């Protein structure tokens, strides 16, 4: 097997494992087993899965399966947001607007909320619109 083939094979193994952990975490979350969902998502998040990074951030943000920690939530939202996850972009923007886990920064908060709004994702767009109105960002 060539070096390129080995790299491609490793990539598919890692992404398959990451997806399996995200799905397993989601099943645990639906059962109310937040500790297990947190642990499953953490494994995938560390492998770079943007959905797992977002879900891990939500766990930290809400304190489900782990002690609430806005600094860790911001860290994982940012990792996911930088890869294009619009829900993470919106939530990261809200943390900047409130100064939770990050230094309060109106322009950075607006940046992330606008990025989420313009993503085309209906859920993120609706949440971004709510944040825009709640924080009076049009003023």
Image (tube, grey):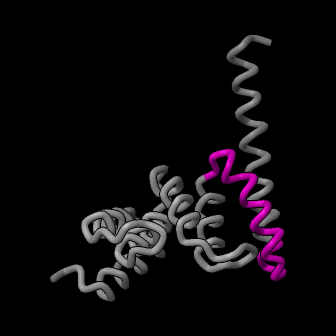
Give the prevailing secondary structure in the magenta stretch. Answer: helix
**Image height of 108 relative to 139, above or below:** above
Q: Residue at x 69, y 75 (%)?
A: 67
Furthest-front residue in view? 103
* Res. 90 image quadrant: bottom left
Compared with residue 15, is residue 135 higher up or lower down, i.e. above or below? below
Q: Is residue 27 left or right of residue 132?
A: right
Residue 93 rendering spot, x and y as whole percentages: 39, 69
Q: Quadrant of the C terminus?
A: bottom left
- Point out the residue furthest to the bottom here: 134
Residue 16 position, x and y percent, is 77, 45
Looking at the rendering, which quadrant does residue 69 occupy? Answer: bottom right
- Left or right: residue 8 compared with residue 32: left
Q: Residue at x 73, y 19 (%)?
A: 5
- Determine the image quadrant of residue 136: bottom left
Which residue is the extreme one toward the left?
139
Number of numbered discs: 0
Q: Is residue 48 located in the magenta-colored stretch of the structure?
A: yes
Front position in the image: 62 or 120: 62
């Amino acid at each position: 097997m060539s070096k390129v083939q080995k790299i491609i094979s490793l990539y598919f193994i890692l992404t398959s494992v990451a997806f399996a952990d995200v799905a397993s975490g989601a099943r645990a979350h639906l059962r109310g087993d937040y500790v297990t969902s947190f642990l499953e998502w953490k494994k995938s998040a560390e492998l770079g899965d943007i959905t797992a990074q977002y879900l891990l951030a939500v766990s930290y943000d809400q304190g489900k399966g782990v002690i609430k920690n806005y600094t860790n939530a911001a860290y994982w939202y940012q990792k996911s947001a930088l890869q294009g996850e619009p829900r993470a972009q919106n939530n990261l923007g809200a943390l900047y607007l409130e100064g939770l886990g990050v230094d309060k920064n109106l322009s950075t908060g607006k940046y992330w909320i606008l990025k989420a709004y313009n993503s085309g994702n209906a859920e993120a767009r609706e949440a971004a619109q709510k944040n825009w109105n709640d924080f009076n960002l049009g003023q």
